Each structure stands twice: as structure tokens, then as C-alpha cells.
Amino acid sequence: MTLILRGLVVHTPKNPFRESGALEPFSDGAIAIQDGKIAAIGNHVQVAERFPQAKTQDCRGGILLPGLIDTHVHYPQTRVIGAMGYTLLDWLEQRTLPLEARLSDNKFARELALEFVRLLLSNGTTTALVFGSHFQGATANLFGAAEDVGLRIIAGQVCSDRKLLPELHTTPEHSYHEQKMLIHRFHNKGKLRYAVTPRFSLSASEGLLEVCQTLMDEHSDVHFTTHINENTDEIRTVAELFPWARDYLETYDRFGLVTNRSVFAHNVHPSELELARLAEAQAAIAHCPSSNAFIGSGIFPMKRHLQHGIRFGLGSDVGGGTGFCLLKEGLTAYIAQRYAEDGFPLTPAHLLYLATRAGAEILGLENTVGDLSVGKAADIIYVRPEEKSTLEVHFRHLDSVEQLLGSLFTLHGEAKVEKVWLDGQEAILN
Ligand SMILES: [Zn+2]
């Protein structure tokens, strides 16, 4: 059975930071889906001719995009969004970690997991690298909830054994055993993958980082994620805790944690040496523009990352960020780069790439998702302007698809994710 989605279709099968013409639009376009995969993409007339028996869904009221990819989001933090007046360390201590401690209660953790996956989906996010919980049971709940709705999730049990809230501390031995069990249970189960996830080296002893290294060595395809260079107080504290380290990155690098499987969130204040080492190791960054602005961390030095050839995708960083919507993250990245002294001039093509294919690339999923090329998983979203909205006016008076895409990012608050297909199956949004 073939399904055709007909409408305005846009994707970025190429990298607009490197190549021109990366944006591929079809104004009366169509995507044909067979067995959960994309069988064709192009102009509607041509696609319809190839599949005369197909059932067609009319999506001409909005825009069809690849499912969005969030490369940094915290499952326990949905209810923290909007905590104003803090910077990183007091925000963690006073608002975020007390809530995270409540996830020792499995019933509460399950409630949050269901809420979290529902919000990812209703915001059009179909793939995410997720910071789990400090608790094994809560992290298992996240995997279970993601599997039930068919989301593509890479996640892990967060670990800390010093500083911050003692209720969240583990020991290296205990963490090893708990993570091992989660890897066996969930890694490579359907679309689930595991990521070794120390919260940050500020709250990790050398023994705990060694355990992370052991897990990465024992499982050659698990991912690694953590935070780095987010806030200047954090960086100072890390320097005090690791007097032998040349810089923040070395606190991970000493333990073999800087690899092409690693995604570091933020990197707002890197040194040139750190950038060179990240590039050499082919490690990647989750750029979280709304969080960086909201917590007052600073502006991401995008140009310097590009100069070093470091890959990066977008992260909502819920709950330091301002919500789950990755279109909004695209707009915030755009605005921040306009403000920055040495900002990069982003275009709508860059924003779409960052919200989709760039994420797939940094998660090693570029052959599976991230754009709408033939053979990829049919993870697709249908986004519509709200009735009588400014965005609807823009849709009615379409000049070019690229301009409309700029409007979509700018007026994201008036865009509604109407439908989501995961592997070609329409998901239930509620
Ligand atoms: Zn974070």
C-alpha cells in the first residue's frame, strides 16, 4: 500500500554551510511512502503518475517537512521551563535538581515520561538525543514511553557523584551496573539507542568518568553526551576540580570521551585549542540558542565552530530553553547570530538544515532520517498556519518557498504541527 502526501514539500538533502542549492523545494510536491520508507519525492504530477494505485492525503494547507531532530533535551525538566532570574548553577540547585530528585518515584517518572514524549511529538520532533534521569527506573520509563509512540530516541541514565544535590549521587560501581542493565535492555531495541551521560564533569569524579570510558569501550556503538563550556562560573569550578586539565574538554578527553560518538551541549565559551581538538576527534555540538539566551550563558560562537569544521545541530535544552519547538530554536539562532559581534549570517536553508539533517548527521543517523530522500524512514511532519494568523497571510501570498520558510521560522508561534508520520505511520497527537 502506497501513501502519497501532496503539498508544499521542502527539505535540505545537502549541507548549506558547504554547498549552494542545498534547499530542495517542490511547491506542488508529493512524497510517496511505501513500507515506512520514502519511495519518491518530487512534483505531484510525476509522483502520482508513478504510483497510480496510491491513496493521496491532501496537505496543501501548509508545508511538509522532515521530522525535526532535537539534539539536546532533558526528559525530567518539562515543568521547569520558564524559571526566570537564574544563571546555570543556581538554576540547577534551586529549580531543576529538586524536581529531578522526585523522579526516584517511578509513578511520577512515568507521568513525566508520557508528558515528555507527547510534547516532543506535538512539536514535530521525531528524533531526539535525550538527557534521561539520574534514576534507572525513571530512565527505563522514558525508553518505554518513546517505544510505545514510535519515537527515535537516544538516551541514557544521567550520572553524578559529587557536588550539587546529594540525593542524585551514585557511585562509580553502582552506576556501572545500572547503566549496563539499561544498555542490555534498551540499546538497539527497535529505534532506541543508549547514550552514556555524565551530567557534566563538575559533578563527576574521575572514578565516574572512568566508568563512562569503560562503558564506551565495552559497547562500540553506544553514544556519549554531556555538557561543556556553558557558563563562566561552571568553567571556573571545573578548572578548580581538575587542576591537571588544560581546559574543560580535557576533563573528558583524558577518559577517552571525546570521539565521533560524542555530542557536547552548548560550548558557548570554548578556547581555540578545545575547538581544534573537537574537530580532530570529529566530536559534535548541540547548539541550544534559546537556553543560552534564557539562562544568560552567552552567544554560541558559530563562525569559530564553522572555521574549525565542527559539526553542530540544534537542541531545545528543555527546561533551560524556552520550549520544545525547534522552529523557535532556529529563529533564536538566527537572531543571536545577528546580535553577535562576529555572527554568522544564517538563511532559511541553514535553519531547516540545522533543525533536521544536521541533527541526523551528528547522531550518526544521516542515512536513516534528516531529509526526505528516497530510501529514508518516512518521518515527516505537516505544519499548518493557524487560521486568520499572520503566517496564514504569508502562506496565501507565497513569493518563494525559501521566503516562506523564513516566515515559518519567524512566525513559528502561529504554526501548528497538524500531523506527524513516524516510519510512514500517522502518529496520534493529543
Ligand atoms: Zn542541558
Image (cartoon, helix red, strand yellow):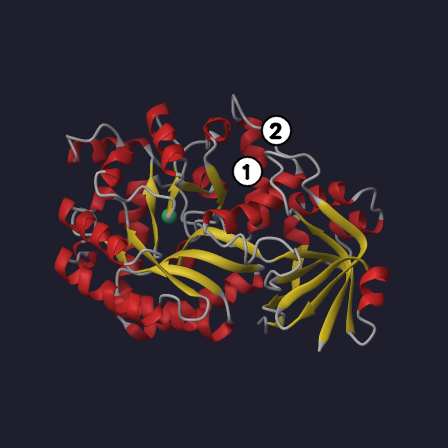
Quarter of the figure that contains the C terminus: bottom right
Neighbor class of circle 1 (other Cα within 10 Å; few <14, some 14-19, many 20+) is many
> On residue 345, which mark appears?
2
Q: Amino acid at mark 1?
A: Ala
SS class, disc 1: helix
As helix, strand or loop, the secondary structure at mark 2 comes to: loop
Q: Position of residue 18 (x, y in %)?
A: 60, 33
Q: Is residue 260 visible?
A: yes
Q: Position of residue 29 (x, y in %)?
A: 79, 57
In depth, the one of 308 and 319 nearer the eye is 308
Q: Which mark is residue 173?
A: none
Distance CA(mark 1)–CA(mark 2): 10 Å
Residue drawn at 40 percent across, 49 percent down: 83
Q: Nearer the viewer, residue 221 or 132?
A: 221
Quadrant of residue 425 in the image?
A: bottom right
Q: Residue at x 22, y 42 (%)?
A: 202
Tell which residue pokes out farthest to the top in this image.
341
Q: Is residue 241 above or below residue 155?
A: above
Within 10 Å of the Cα at label 2, are there few (<14), some (14-19), or many (20+) other Cα atoms?
A: few
Give residue 20's quadrant in the image: top right
Contact flag, marks 1 and 2 (Cβ < 8 Å): no
Q: State the image coordinates of residue 28 (x, y, percent, origin top left).
A: 83, 56
Residue at the spot 21% in from the left edge and 38% down from the top edge: 254
- The quadrant in which the N terminus is found is bottom right
Percent coordinates x, y for residue 405 in the rendering? 71, 45
> Does the closest atom of ligand 1 sit within 8 Å of the Cβ of label 2?
no
Type of amino acid under label 2: Pro
Q: Is residue 380 above or below residue 339?
A: below
Q: Identify the residue at horizontal 46%, vertical 29% (top origin).
A: 301
Q: Which residue is mark 1?
A: 333
